[in-house]
Image: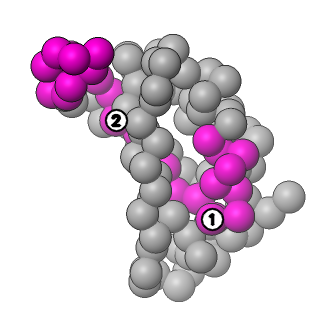
């Protein structure tokens, strides 16, 4: 099974650092970085808002625990957003490529 994983980061530099490490370590097949995400959330008993960067990662499920560990090691947030959704279907050639480039 493959996953789409959402991670928010404080800025483009942090997003790039996380994405590059995960790809280099063959934990993910691809990362998309979306700038200018406006986030509104509750943190430490108050409503807060900030500009963030969204990473959309594509990865095999078998690497998810290592992906979490890597993100936590590189991320500046006390509690980084790391949310995974299953890919229930997709282009078979793309899914095959994802498997091949993340083989260890």
Which sits in the foreground, 95 or 52? 52
Residues in magenta, as a range: 40-68
| Residue 100 locus on image (x, y percent) | 73, 68
Q: Please check the rendered image and state whether residue 47 is part of the magenta-colored stretch, yes or no.
A: yes
User: Which residue corresponds to the image point at 62% horizontal and 41% vertical from the top-left?
Assistant: 68
Q: Residue 63 lies in magenta, yes or no? A: yes
Q: In terms of depth relative to the viewer, which is nearer, 74 or 15? A: 74
Instruction: Please give left or right for residue 100 compared with residue 78 in the image.
Output: right
Which residue sits at x=29%, y=15%? 44
Residue 12 sits above or below residue 67 on the image: above
Q: Quick one: 79 or 70, which is closer to the camera?
A: 79
Indicate the quadrant where residue 37 lies.
top left
Figure quadrant of residue 103: bottom right
- Spatial distance from mark 1 to mark 2, Cα to Cα? 20 Å
Does residue 67 lie above or below 40 as drawn? Answer: below
**Image height of 15 relative to 98, above or below:** above
Q: Quadrant of the N terminus?
A: bottom right
Report helix, strand or loop for mark 1: helix
What kind of element bears circle 2?
strand
Which residue was labeled with disc 1?
A: 61
Which residue does the numbered mark 2 point to in the structure image? 54
């Amino acid at each position: 099974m493959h996953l789409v994983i959402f991670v928010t980061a404080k800025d483009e530099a942090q997003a790039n650092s996380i994405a590059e490490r995960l790809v280099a370590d063959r934990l993910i097949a691809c990362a998309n970085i979306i700038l200018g995400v406006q986030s509104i959330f509750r943190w430490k008993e108050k409503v807060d808002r900030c500009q963030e960067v969204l990473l959309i990662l594509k990865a095999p499920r078998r690497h998810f625990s290592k992906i979490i560990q890597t993100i936590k090691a590189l991320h500046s947030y006390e509690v980084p957003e790391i949310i995974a959704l299953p890919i229930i279907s997709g282009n078979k050639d793309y899914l095959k490529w994802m498997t091949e480039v993340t083989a260890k």
